[in-house]
Image (tube, helix red, strand yellow):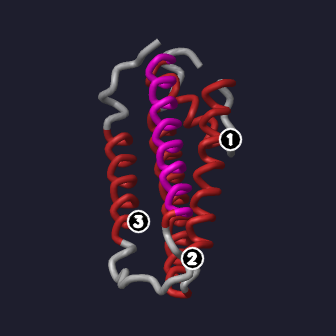
Amino acid sequence: MEEGQWDIKEIKQLKKKQLVRSNLFMLLVFILLVYLFQSGHFLFIVWVLLAFLFIVLVHSIYALKTGNFIGTKTSKYLNEFDRHRSGEKGWKRTKIHEIVFLTVLGVGMAVLLYLIDFSSPPPNVSHAHLPFIGAWIGYNLGEIAKMRNLKEQPEHG
């Protein structure tokens, strides 16, 4: 789309809906992880998280290489808007940073698979959920800030 053809009100509404869906998904994941964690399925949790990271990484690499997005009509539309808003260089730089971060995180988790003895009893991990909650809150604050700044950001071409 050309500059000026984006309906900012519609974009904000779609981003709000996407944030609600993301939060419902995160709540489901959180409940599942708490259940698995309390059941002692630590190895399974790490493998599931590693698989999820790999899928997100492949999705990001695909988007960077082809410029196409995989997802719902809404997510594709919002990704195109974000790409247009950031400019091609900014969007590519952001995607590269995302890919590097996901790769480092995935390699770190893979190393943990070999270093941690999952057969021994786990240590007291009563606050193990706090990093997840912190990331969740950070994600929400970031998305809300992006929505509020939509009017203020200048268009890039």
Q: Considering the numbered disc 3 on the image, is that residue within a helix, a strand or a loop?
A: helix
Residue in the image at 51% along x and 65% along y: 26
- Report which residue position mark 1 lands on: 73
Query: What residue range appears in magenta?
Result: 88-114
The span from disc 1 to disc 3 (Cα, nearest Å) is: 28 Å
The span from disc 2 to disc 3 (Cα, nearest Å) is: 12 Å
Spot occupied by residue 17 in the image (x, y as percentages of width and height): 52, 53
Q: Which amino acid type corresponds to the residue marked 3 in the rendered image?
A: Phe
Q: Quadrant of the N terminus?
A: top right
Q: Considering the numbered disc 1 on the image, is that residue within a helix, a strand or a loop?
A: helix
Total number of numbered labels?
3
Question: Is residue 157 one of those drawn in magenta?
Answer: no
Q: Which amino acid type corresponds to the residue marked 2 in the rendered image?
A: Leu
- Report which residue position mark 2 lands on: 32
The span from disc 2 to disc 1 (Cα, nearest Å) is: 28 Å
- The answer to which of 75 and 47 lies nearer the viewer is 47
Res 124 quadrant in image? bottom left
- Is 14 left, or right, of 155 in this rendering? right
Spot occupied by residue 46 in the image (x, y as percentages of width and height): 56, 66
Residue in the image at 51% along x and 17% along y: 88
In the displayed structure, 118 sits above or below 26; it is: below
Q: Which amino acid type corresponds to the residue marked 1 in the rendered image?
A: Lys
**Which of the labelled discs sits on residue 102, or is there none?**
none
Residue in the image at 69% along x and 39% along y: 70
Task: State if disc 3 and disc 1 touch (CB < 8 Å).
Answer: no
